[in-house]
Image: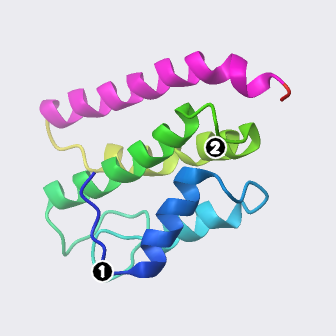
Amino acid sequence: MNIPAQDPELVELRQLIRSGSSPDSPYLIQKWLHTESCCINRRGMEPCQRCSKERQQNHFEQQFYLLLDTISDELIDPQWRCLCLDYIYRPLHTLHQLIENEQDRAHWLQLRHELSVCSHYVAAGLNQPR
């Protein structure tokens, strides 16, 4: 994953999201999704008019995969994994808004399929008490 490291707060938020070390702090995901944007204008989860489509797609796909990796990690608290599952639609929805051609659509459908397969695979583990 190509993550710019210039903003220490975002690096820390990504690490907190991925590690699930604060499962009782759902605001962390909201803060991360709101704070991290594809460019300096901080538009959050809306497509940006200043960045290239490729940069935006890469950015939101990185968000998608960070959440998907967290959801898939069986060592992370199930409550946190469920919360990540609740929020993964945001970058996926923004990627859908960026579709301009059949190649984009096929890629978006592939991401959606990955999420579907992953969520079915981990569903049993998320519903079992630890």
Few, some or many residues within 10 Å of mark 1 (<14, 14–19, 20+): few
Q: Quadrant of residue 110?
A: top left
x 23%, y 43%: residue: 99
The stretch drawn in magenta includes residue 72: no
Q: Secondary structure at mark 2?
A: helix
Confirm whether the magenta stretch covers residue 121: yes
Q: Nearer the viewer, mark 2 or mark 1?
A: 1
* Residue in the picture at 30% in, 82% down: 40
- Answer with mark 2 or mark 1, whichever residue precedes in sequence: 1
Vertical relation: 42 (above or below) 122: below
User: In which quadrant is the C terminus drawn?
Assistant: top right
Location of mark 2 (residue): 86
Seen in the picture, residue 16 relative to 71 is either above or below; the reply is below
What's the magenta bit mostly, secondary-structure-wise?
A: helix
At label 2, counting other C-alpha atoms closer than 10 Å, the crowd grade (few under 14, some 14-19, many 20 or more) is: few
Q: Amino acid at mark 1?
A: Gln
- Residue type at mark 2: give it: Asp
> Could you tell me how far apart the alpha carbons at marks 2 and 1 are, in whole angstroms?
28 Å
Q: Residue at x 19, y 75 (%)?
A: 50
Query: Which segment is the magenta one?
Result: 102-128
Query: Which residue in the protein does label 1 denote?
Result: 6
Q: Is residue 87 above or below residue 71?
A: below
Q: Residue 20: where, in percent of width, then height?
A: 64, 52
Q: How is the image coloured?
A: rainbow
Would residue 76 be found to the left or right of residue 39 on screen? right
Which quadrant of the structure image shows residue 24?
A: bottom right
Given residues 76 and 50, the one toward you in this image is: 76
Q: Looking at the picture, how far across and down is residue 113, in whole percent?
A: 40, 22
